[in-house]
Image (cartoon, helix red, strand yellow):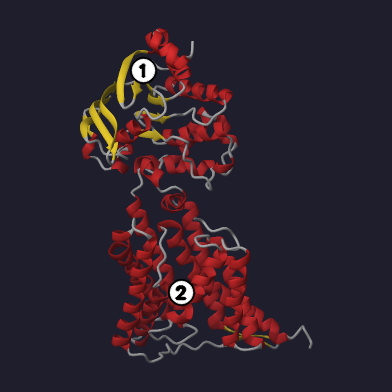
Amino acid sequence: MDFFDIYLVEAMLNGVLLGGVLGLLALGLNLIFGVVDVVWIAYAELVMSGMYVVYWLHAFGVPMVLAGLAAMAVVAVMGLAVHQLIIAPILNTPPINQLLATGGLLFFLQNFATVLFSAEFRNTGVSLPSLRLGDISLSYSRIIAFGVAIAGVLGLYWFLKKTFIGAAIRAVAQDRQVMVLMGVDTRKIYLVTSAIGGALAGLAALLLCLQIDVHPFIGLQYGPITFMICVLGGLGNMLGGFLASFIIGQIISIVGFSISQDFAYVVAFLLFILVMFVRPEGILKRRA
Amino acid sequence: MLELQGISAGYGSFQALFDVSLTVQPGEAVAVVGPNGAGKTTLMRVISGLLPARSGTVRMQGRDLSKVAPHRIIAEGIAHVPENRRLFPRMTVEENLKMGAFLRAAREDFPERMEWVFGLFPRLRERRSQIAGTLSGGEQQMCAIGRALMSKPKLLLMDEPSAGLAPVVVLQVFDLVRRIRQEGFTVLIVEQNVQQVLKLADRAYLLEVGAIKMSGHAKELQQHDFVRKAYIGL
């Protein structure tokens, strides 16, 4: 078998593009966990909600970019609501409560979406051409999604590194008790972080709308993989999550190309299980 | 400037402070000394608003602090250097100092304030981009004090600055405190190392098992038999 198969290269490139979007998803989840120390089980459902926002706005003639910005705003507000109404009241109770509560939110959102929009698969109808490099064909949708995802990641990095609030968010993740002495209201930091997590989910929603159909149970496709990537990279470790998303992106793309899409997920999860046996804290250590 | 009257406080059913009263005048360095478990850190936490007092009042420049939310205490002019430094381990020296200037008023001239802190502590300037967790104990203490100074506080609270540091480093830290005093800062230090802190304080209170057993000018306490035998070991 000729290893230098041009279609393998195409699969690898697609894997990189996929990794970017997965990285964005993982980033939001890691941010919330690293700072607020809670896991939003319903994170993929927030993305799903954002996708519906994009779909419906676009169906009414709103350009995709604006629809995306609107989705970011809407899901950011949802993030605030999730924190204020669901997380904050149970913040100091055993973590199982947060898992159960956000798990309940997951079912609520899935079924609410079904009631509102029915279980149909809906396509935004945005169809972009493909970039041709010799025999390789890369969809512009995926390239744009990758570019925007990376821009989002860099934007978040800049925000966390250069602004005072960003520094405070990073600091809370390292020592929340001492923050009071700096004059920081940790409740506000949690809210800001939750809003940012929501906005990232909204951005991911736009990018997914460019590539796949939306339906109420799309979370089942992206949720588990996002969690798996976060844990693989070290839960709460943003750099780790980013690395893991590219690794998984490659696996899904290459195995999907050589064998089948379903088997790709099997292999990805098998790798995850293996890594958990060997190094349970993740590739880069988790931020406890 | 700072006035505590009849403060009692505790954790659950355990009472740690019994009717503690003390004052700190502007420009003074006041020490609260005592053995382990005397309630010194509890006292600091009450002043910082981290622990509510069960009875008594804390007044800063006449203002009753019990009405003030804990994260606003720093805005009242009280900066707390916590026990064991509590720097942000994965952030650089510069970023730690940045967090000290989080108050809106301090944010605006953050660069100038940082220059001023570097002027006081040149070692920190050398290590400004170093990750705080990798600093030596003495450097961490310097950084923690610098971080508190970023808010240009009226009163600096220092909780056991010598804790966990080698004796040579302890001397360096107390020299830092002298330098801060020269800049005109008012300081309240809680310390186990009675001998060293009495050398730099104006007045001191002796806290034992949650109550003030003795107080007076530092020089007097240094000479006092009880203190010498029990704490200084002379």
Q: Work out which quarter of the rendered image holds the N terminus of chain B and state it.
A: top left
Identify whether A116 is placed above or below A238: below
Q: Which residue is mark 2?
A: A204
Q: Residue at x 54, y 70 (%)?
A: A229
Expressed as whole percent of the image width and height from the top left, the position of residue B45 reads: 34, 36
Asked whether the beta carbons under mark 1 and mark 2 sit within 8 Å of each other, the answer is: no
Judged from the image, the secondary structure of the residue bearing numbered disc 1 is strand
Mark 2 — on which chain does it sit?
Answer: A
Q: In the picture, residue B66 is in which quadrant?
A: top left
* Left/right of residue B215 with respect to residue A152 in the rendered view: left
Comparing marks 1 and 2, which lies closer to the viewer? 1
Identify whether B125 is placed above or below A223: above
Expressed as whole percent of the image width and height from the top left, the position of residue B23 reads: 28, 22
The residue closer to the viewer here, B168 or A196, is: B168
Q: Is residue B25 visible?
A: no
Q: Which residue is mark 1?
A: B204
Identify whether A186 is placed above or below B117: below
* Left/right of residue A98 with respect to residue A129 in the rendered view: left
Q: Which kind of residue does numbered mark 2 sit on?
A: Ala
Q: Which kind of residue does numbered mark 1 sit on?
A: Ala
Considering every residue shown, the one lying at the far front of the view is B13
Q: Residue at x 40, y 25 (%)?
A: B189
Spatial CA distance of label 1 from label 2 is 60 Å
The residue closer to the viewer here, B157 or A266, is: A266
* Left/right of residue B99 with respect to residue B93 in the rendered view: left
The residue closer to the viewer here, A137 or A5, is: A5
